[in-house]
Image (cartoon, rainbow, N blue to C red):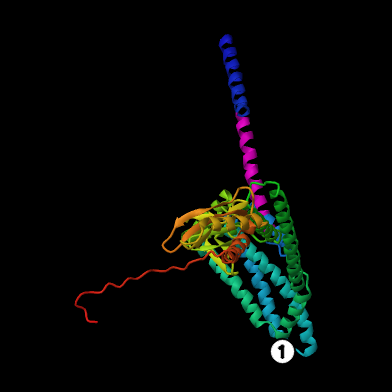
Amino acid sequence: MNCLTRLFAVLRVFVVAIFIAGPTAHSPALAQETPQEELQDNTSSEVSELVTRALEANVSLEDLNILLVPLTASEMAQVVEGWQAHLRSHLELLSNLNLDIKVSSDTAAEDLRKQLTLVQQTNKSYLDNFQTAITAWQGKGASPEEIKPYQDYAYAATAGALRTTDPKTLMNAALDWLTDTDGGLGFLISVLTIMVAIWALMLVARLARRMTIRGLTRVPTLSKLLKSFISTAVFWAVMVLGVLVVLGLFGVNVTPLFAVFGGLSFILGFALQETLGNLASGLMIMVLKPFDTGDYIQVGSSSGFVDEMSVVSTKIRTFDNQIIVVPNSKIWGDIITNVSASETRRVDLVFGIGYSDDAALAIEVLTKLVAQHELCLKDPAPEIFVGELGESSVNIFCRPWAKNDDYWTVFWDLTGQAKIEFDANGISIPFPQRDVHLIPVEGAAR
């Protein structure tokens, strides 16, 4: 019995020990759950504190933007509601002051107008915060149907406040706005700053174009047309990028502009297919260099000196100083004759003499004229020979060589001198003639 009594006592102590150790064994789990609950409580308290701080009447617009970042859509709705209430209270105060101004004396009205001006300034800051909260709420997922009543209230409140405000107060507010750095004066400073920035941007673009031209002059294989195109492209690229940078510095969101440019490029690609074809042809002409500025070319029915070339057309100046504008696709798709491609050019002259005249004497006269002309080249040697027996004359071909710039001078000089020398040597230059023989018909009336 004593043994059994002792055994039961030991078992009782063991059970009590297990019972006491049980909660201790589970204490880590409880320790893990307690911080999570505390974290949730702290998070909810922090969120409510953020909403409260975002609804403080004296919060600045910059601080409000920071406070709105962690808030959820439901919390943003509370902020919007709160700022609408702030705005409404000040609009109510504004309406009461306008009513008091109407029934007050001049001295009291002036004091009320001063109060009204202060209320309007506060009302403007409230309206800015209200609209900022609406925009942030929209970014957090608010639907247009949820936002529309608040936006309508903001627009209607602004218009109504301006419409019902005392005219003299509005005039004073307008004068204050004109002299305020955040109003008219600030706007004027911004405009002047933008003008100075654009002027500086143009200087930078011109400097970039000048440096581009200087760098391209070291590449002799490029044509003048391609150099001009590249320098112009650099100028406008710097201008466009600079304008985007200036707009970004002044707070303008330039991201939507890229989407607009993308849509416009897609539309213009269909609308300006022929222009794009001219652009591609112009680039091919600039790269492959079939001609350059100052060259005398013949394209189709047009001929003259190349004055300039744009991405879509080429200007050709004729001898009588007419300007012909030819689309680049017409030039690239036709046969191009570049008369100025070589430094020298052969002058092709044809002189007709009578069949009864001495052809050898005519060749001797022309050989002497070519040898005496200072612009006719000795190398390559000139060629003078009887080239054709025509219907009315014996045609002598005279083919001296001259530099490109001297071509027409040699052509006109030799033509005039040959006429004088042929007359002096009794060599005739016949005109077209035809012998007509009349054959009488038997039995015809005479």
Callout 1 secondary element: helix
Position of residue 186 in the picture relative to residue 336 (left or right): right
Foreground pick, 94 / 208: 208
Report x, y in % for residue 335. Answer: 48, 55
Q: Return the residue at label 1.
A: 103
Q: Residue at x 59, y 75 (%)?
A: 156
Would you place residue 360 above or below residue 108 in this image? Answer: above
Position of residue 310 in the picture relative to residue 440 (left or right): right
Foreground pick, 220 / 381: 381
Determine if the magenta segment contains residue 46: yes
| Label 1 environment density (alpha carbons within 10 Å; few <14, some 14–19, many ≥20) | few
Report x, y in % for residue 95. Answer: 67, 80
Report x, y in % for residue 381. Answer: 60, 48
Foreground pick, 295 / 410: 410
Residue 231 picture quarter: bottom right
Would you place residue 31 above or below residue 188 in this image? Answer: above
Q: The N terminus appears in which quarter of the rendering?
A: top right
Q: The C terminus appears in which quarter of the rendering?
A: bottom left
Determine if the magenta segment contains residue 66: no
- Residue situated furthest right in the rendering: 107
Report x, y in % for residue 261. Answer: 56, 59
Would you place residue 235 above or below residue 20 in this image? Answer: below
The prevailing secondary structure element of the residues shown in magenta is helix
Would you place residue 271 above or below residue 290 in this image? Answer: below
Q: Residue at x 63, y 28 (%)?
A: 24
- Residue situated furthest left in the rendering: 443
Name the kind of residue labelled 1 in the image.
Answer: Val
In the image, the segment drawn in magenta is: 26-54
